[in-house]
Amino acid sequence: MRAVGVVPARREVAMFGHAKPCLTAPTDVRIRTIEVGICGTDREICSFAYGTPPDGSEYLVLGHEALGEVLEVGAGISTLKPGDLVVPTVRRPCPHPQCLPCRDERQDFCFTGDFTERGIKMTHGFMTEFFVEEERHLNLVPDELSDIAVLVEPLSVAEKALAQIWQVQQRLPWEEPLAADQPRGAGKTAVVLGAGPVGILGAKVGGFDVVYEAVGSARISFDLLKVLGMNGIFVFTGIPAQQPAIPIEADSLMRDMVLKNQVAIGTVNADRPAFQGAIRDLGVFKRRWPEATRALITGRFPMDAYRDLLLGKSTGIKNVISFG
Ligand code: BGC
Ligand code: ZN
């Protein structure tokens, strides 16, 4: 079958043949790829600043934002059946028994660094016609979200960030809503930095006194850190490529962080509840803002368009490869 990926040793981005996957465990699910979103991480892997093929493979199949249809399930599967729509998570746990987060299905907090990520780090991705995945890494998507479910993975980044924000907010117990009919964070404002999908999707769940960074630029981020409010939380989600050092006003930033009780927090990736939250909230967005939500997907392209999408000028909000 066809796959799109990189050969880092030869600095090549290419479409090539890749063995069709089959079930190897009773908990495996075989999936037909429907759509794969392209993001800054993919483009960065194509500039060879990031990304690692699996051990023993010279290439890495790209793609970590996928929507697929279940074709076949192993004998041990009870929650999925052929025809179901699914979105896979990205990160896979490390093997070390002492890594408590990985053992607790919180590989987004893996502390050994030996996690893998599909389409990014040492595990092939989804930019291919079929893939196999374990049931525990798949999220069932309702059919009525089929046109936007490729956005679940980027939204899961914002969902995890929001969960982290609530945990940090617990240090301010009086900030909890006074009335039961008030949503959490009512009356607060948030600044969202970045106008790509992670930023736009994150904006729809924002609170106040929060900066949600999805721009991937340290210069812009540290400029905004200067205006973070009292007791504020600054959440970094961008992964900038290495650039020459920049001057920052470190003394005044440090003074502010202390005198204003500020927290700067980084967050990567997402756990399963964050994916499930993303699926639920995409449904909410679609009911509230049907046109705007659909318009997040700039264009759908056939697999053959991969070069332009990965190496050409970055355009629009979210471009998607459609496998038909
Ligand atoms: C993905 C994350 C991943 C990160 C770093 C992002 O584009 O959405 O799941 O952890 O890249 O590899
Ligand atoms: Zn780990």
Image (cartoon, rainbow, N blue to C red):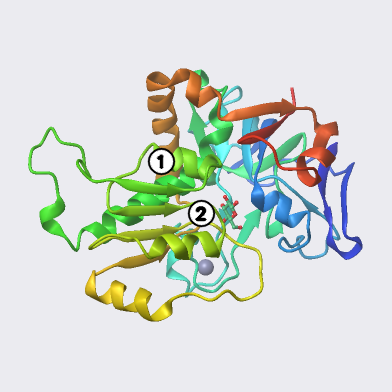
Q: Is residue 6 left or right of residue 217?
A: right
Q: What crowding class fits label 1: few (fewer than 14 Cα within 10 Å), some (14-19), or many (20 or more)? A: some
Indicate yes or no: mark 2 CB to ligand 1 under 8 Å.
yes
**272 shown above or below 235:** above
Q: Quadrant of residue 263?
A: bottom left
Q: Quadrant of residue 245?
A: bottom right
- The nearer-to-camera label among 1 and 2 is 1
Q: Is residue 155 left or right of residue 251?
A: right
The x and y percentages for residue 38 are 68, 41
The x and y percentages for residue 49 are 74, 64
Q: Quadrant of the N terminus?
A: top right
Q: Nearer the viewer, residue 103 or 37?
A: 37
The x and y percentages for residue 256 are 29, 73
Q: Nearer the viewer, residue 55 or 23?
A: 55
| Kind of element beneath mark 2 | loop
The x and y percentages for residue 31 are 67, 33
**252 shown above or below 107:** below
Q: Quadrant of the C terminus?
A: top right
Residue sitting at 51 percent across and 59 percent down? 220
> Could you say which disc has been placed on residue 269 in the image?
2
Identify residue type, mark 1.
Ala
In primary-sequence order, the first of circles 1 and 2 is 1
Residue 26 shows in the view: no
Residue pointed to by mark 1: 203
Q: CA distance from mark 1 to mark 2?
A: 17 Å
Indicate yes or no: mark 1 CB to ligand 1 under 8 Å.
no
